[in-house]
Image (cartoon, coloured by chain):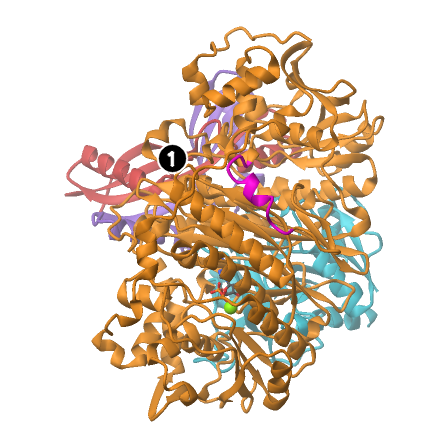
Chain colours: A purple, B red, C orange, D cyan
Amino acid sequence: MSRFRVSLHITPRRGLLDPQGKAVADALHTLGFGAVRDVHVGRHLIVELDAADRAAAESQVREMCQRLLANPVTEDFAVAGVEAASA
Amino acid sequence: MSRFRVSLHITPRRGLLDPQGKAVADALHTLGFGAVRDVHVGRHLIVELDAADRAAAESQVREMCQRLLANPVTEDFAVAGVEAASA
Amino acid sequence: MTVHKRPGDPAITPALVAEHGITEDEYRRLIDMLGRAPTFTELGVVSALWSEHCSYKHSRPLLRTLPTKADYVLQGPGENAGVIAIGDGLAVAFKIESHNHPSAVEPYQGAATGVGGILRDVFTMGARPIAMLNSLRFGALDSARVRYLVAGVVKGIGDYGNCVGVPTVAGEVVFDPAYDGNPLVNAMCVGLLKESELMRAVAQGVGNPIIAVGARTGRDGIHGASFASEDLSDANEAKRPRVQVGDPFTEKLLLEASLELIHSGHIVAIQDMGAAGLTSSSAEMAARGDVGVTIDVSRVPVREPHMTPYEILLSESQERMLVVAKRGREDAVRAILEKWDLTAAVIGEVIAEPVYRVTEGDTVIAEFPGTRLVTDCPTYTPDAAESPAIRALRERDVDALPERPEESDPVWTLTQLLSSPTIASKQWVYRQYDSTVRTNTVVGPGGDAAVLRIPHSTRGIAVKTDCNGRYVYLDPRAGARIAVAEAARNVACTGARPKAITNNLNFGNPRKPETYYQLREAVAGMAEACTALGTPVTGGNVSLYNESPRGAVYPTPVIGMVGLLDDVSRAARATFAAPGDRIVLLGEPTASIGASEYLQRIHGVVAGAPPACDLAAEQALIDTLVEAIGAGVVTSAHDCSDGGLAVALAECAIMNRGRQLGARVDLTPWAGLPLRALLFGEGQGRALVSTPDAKRVRALAAQHGVPAREIGAVDGGDTLQIAVGGRSIVAKLAALDEAYFEAIPRIMSRPASAAADSPVTTAV
Amino acid sequence: MKFGIVTFPGSNCDYDAYRAVVETLGETAVYVWHKDHDLQDADVVVLPGGFSYGDYLRPGAIARFSPIMTEVAAHARRGGPVLGICNGFQIACEAGLLPGALLRNANLQFISELVTLRVERADTAFTNRYRPGQTIAIPIAHGDGRYTADADTLQRLEGEGRVVFRYVAPPGTPGAGEWWSPNGAMHAIAGIVSDGGNVLGMMPHPERAVSPLLGSSDGVGVFQSLLTAVAA
Ligand SMILES: Nc1ncnc2c1ncn2[C@@H]1O[C@H](COP(=O)(O)OP(=O)(O)O)[C@@H](O)[C@H]1O
Ligand SMILES: [Mg+2]
């Protein structure tokens, strides 16, 4: 068993209203960042876990996403990275 | 000017209490994911903007983090990726 | 026992002592007490307990002068919260507390943890929290940084209280450049208990175990208590403690578990680990019981590895409690906590030896004789002198100030005042607070005081916080009297009889003579008013060093008033209720505009003497209101305060957005007064009532010697019309509504930023 | 009749629901602990408001795995009435007892106020004491009440008449009676029922509108309707 750190992105499904993204984009414009075209806000989760190997760590985390971490009705998830961590 | 998509991670600063991370870790344990050691919950932002080049896009987004996106007292931020996007 | 220095502890040098905020005199006192030099751990413990925040060293001599007694006061100052009996074997516990410094650094968490702390102070008395209030002061809203603070503080208060499930029902928000850089965030909690279940935080019983309950201890907020006792100057930035993060979910579990523990009979005392955490809670409980205690830091559940005893003792991690249980009941205590998914660890016990002792395993690392750690803290009475500059401001003849040309239309002035953020509706704020959970809220935010029904009873309580810092700045004694009187009047406007107060003294650096003068005079004024109105002080909080690089905040003694209604179904609201009702003014108009919101908003002037406050007249007004409302002859009552009579009339007409009712009044009897003073002067001792039976109200007022005059009627139209002499002032309700309700949302829709911006405005 | 009110860690309107049933209705209520597997023979299950598990991750996401939820789902499958209020609505959606999801309010703020609802269906177990089209005043108090579902689901809900309560502009205001959503809910949806009609989820709090003293007693009808429905 080794320790892994899996990084996840959970994002509102495209096409759904993203008031948070819009509020941030508006605020950035007012602050003078006129070059901003669009902003999306999602969640970034880091799960540290013990697993036999990278692949096992990733597949376990995918299962966690399906069961709990992401809402299938409104959210998509993606594993952004898996790295070895020290226990 | 080209269009870039900058991906950001904003995470609770280490050492600060992360009640949300703890609640999620506990829930994962109850669901049978006993191998989970720790969970942190932060935000994942995608900022689409026009900039002269990658470096300019990244440095602008860093400034946005300092001024608006991240809470300087409780959060750390990291640019997770910069990719070219179609306008 | 021998006290051991821990390997790796820094040597005690004068510099280290000074860094701990301990003066040379205090250090000598410490050596006297110990009979030797302190260890590093002991130095930390003392620096926390002798900090201003924990020891009240600059305020205690003054606080002793406050009236604290009445036959219904069950618990006065000195406990986690004050308690008054309300009849039928029931009692109300309440207390206010500040989180100014943490909120200046991190508004969201600072405010949230302030709410958490005050909730714990109330439920540790055995009371179920039933209402929260908050009293807030910010700089001018033009600044993006101030908007960031406002948004963060309000969200922090809301998220915490909403999650725990306690309604936030009242409060106040004032915006003034005097608070730029140093906002004030005071939170008050009110709880309900059976008299028989009143719990005190008094350690007792040799051999009884001391148990740490709730969240684990991390490195949060170490030296928060001493930090709260320093100026927010930039030099201190690096020393700032790590912010505390609140967890309202754990708080809710802790609340339920604590009440269950208290009712179980398994414990003898319980206290929140608040400022200076484990150290102050254990030392204070021991001192109250005059017993010895020993604590083993190695048994405290920690969140992070390698924490030193110094850190464990001083951590201000949130949502933790210290419990003294009955010996042999440890498992029963643990079972209750486990039900709520909380942990408990026995970390010490009450001992026969009269010492406060800390061990790490078997090694003694700190030991203080008796309870002297708590009782021996020095107190100070610094020099006091009024600032000549402020005196000059007060003595300025503001009534001679020429009018602005726009003022030829009083509707313009009225609209300006209604849209002044300090007067404008705070709906943007309280809409973010759950004010109806627990189904006791009879009158929520948006009028004068809030009213809550007492379950299984016909009675209710009314609560409100008040303070006009500008008045206190210009005249501390008069200003503090007014703060008490206004709080009492607001409560009386619902029909409740004011009973007792808690208070939060927010002042600057007491070592400056002009600040200490303000503190001394304000406490004197508060004492006078509380004595006159029969509302003893049951507790409070002192927050000093509220200074930013720009200077001290306005001296702001916030009063939290609790009143009692016999028949809650008779509670009056502030807004006109029925067309046809007559409008009666209780009290007299004023000839002065001194210290008014009008002067500040319209002329940018902070000067003049605050209105006179005749406490006997206030008492008579209160009696009249309570009797008239109790007799059911009054359909609405609203006090006149900020913005004066015209603003109060407008508020009566528009504040209930679901039912705005126009009115016509005639102020001709006072046509001899300067018009702007008549309309916008802030005379005290006044209230506007509407009634179907003006004669009866006038008769009741006459019995109490309160001037009462019928000034007009609610006509239910869409204007407010004020006649004075030959002149008629007509304001459309729609325009007043827009000024009053949209002012704050409009400003708050502009962007906010944590980054400091250059403040332009300064007071005066 | 017996109401079983589930207490999750962080529930805080369980008490309000209890009072509504016992003090206002004069019926029996029991608290049901989330770790238990026993509904104590309750006729009606109430999933109350509050912040179960602190609303961490997503409101309702963690609570739906509580042991008692197995029993609640079984009760619902048998056709037993389940009333999910506020956080209870969120839990019911997360648990799949109702379709859709409740997202952060569109203005990104918690909203606490008295709102006007139109009773769209007066023939359900929860609304038979109201008139169809009647408007009622009920408080809301939530940060995540923006009802969201995909286009198919929405169409099905509307087609099958499962939208029971809708937010409308209050009487006496411009556009009175028209859809007006305080939180950005799709189709101004405030409450829906399951396809069997026995599970109601609603964001507003009928249990807080049970006495004129509290500003409205319009919520009592929800509880009275259940009495009628269960007795039938
Ligand atoms: N921070 C707040 N939280 C909750 N309610 C508030 C807050 N600020 C103001 N309110 C409410 O708004 C109303 C008006 O407040 P205020 O202007 O202080 O009244 P008054 O002038 O009568 O003292 C009151 O009902 C008060 O409780
Ligand atoms: Mg008032």
Give coordinates of residue A53: x percent, y percent: 51, 18
Relative vertical location of residue C704 with respect to residue C271 in this rendering, above or below: below
Give coordinates of residue C189: x percent, y percent: 61, 51
Give coordinates of residue D74: x percent, y percent: 75, 51
Q: Does the magenta stretch include residue C58?
A: yes
Residue C711 is left or right of residue C256, and the answer is left
Locate the C terminus of chain D and report the quarter of the image it occupies: bottom right
Residue C176 is left or right of residue C325, and the answer is left
Residue C128 is left or right of residue C587, and the answer is right
Tell me the residue that label 1 is attached to.
B9
In the image, what residue type sits under mark 1?
His
Identify the residue at the far bottom of this view: C726
Residue C266 is left or right of residue D53, and the answer is right
Relative vertical location of residue C400 with respect to residue C43 in this rendering, above or below: below
Whether residue D157 is visible to the viewer of this picture, yes or no, is no
| Residue plotted at (36% across, 81% down) | C673
Res. C698 image quadrant: bottom right
Of all chains, the one bearing label 1 is: B
Locate the N terminus of chain D and report the quarter of the image it occupies: bottom right
Whether residue C332 is visible to the viewer of this picture, yes or no, is yes
Indicate the secondary structure of the residue bearing disc 1.
strand
Looking at the rendering, the stretch of residues picked out in magenta corresponds to C56-67
The chief SS type of the magenta part is: loop
Relative vertical location of residue C109 with respect to residue D15 in this rendering, above or below: above
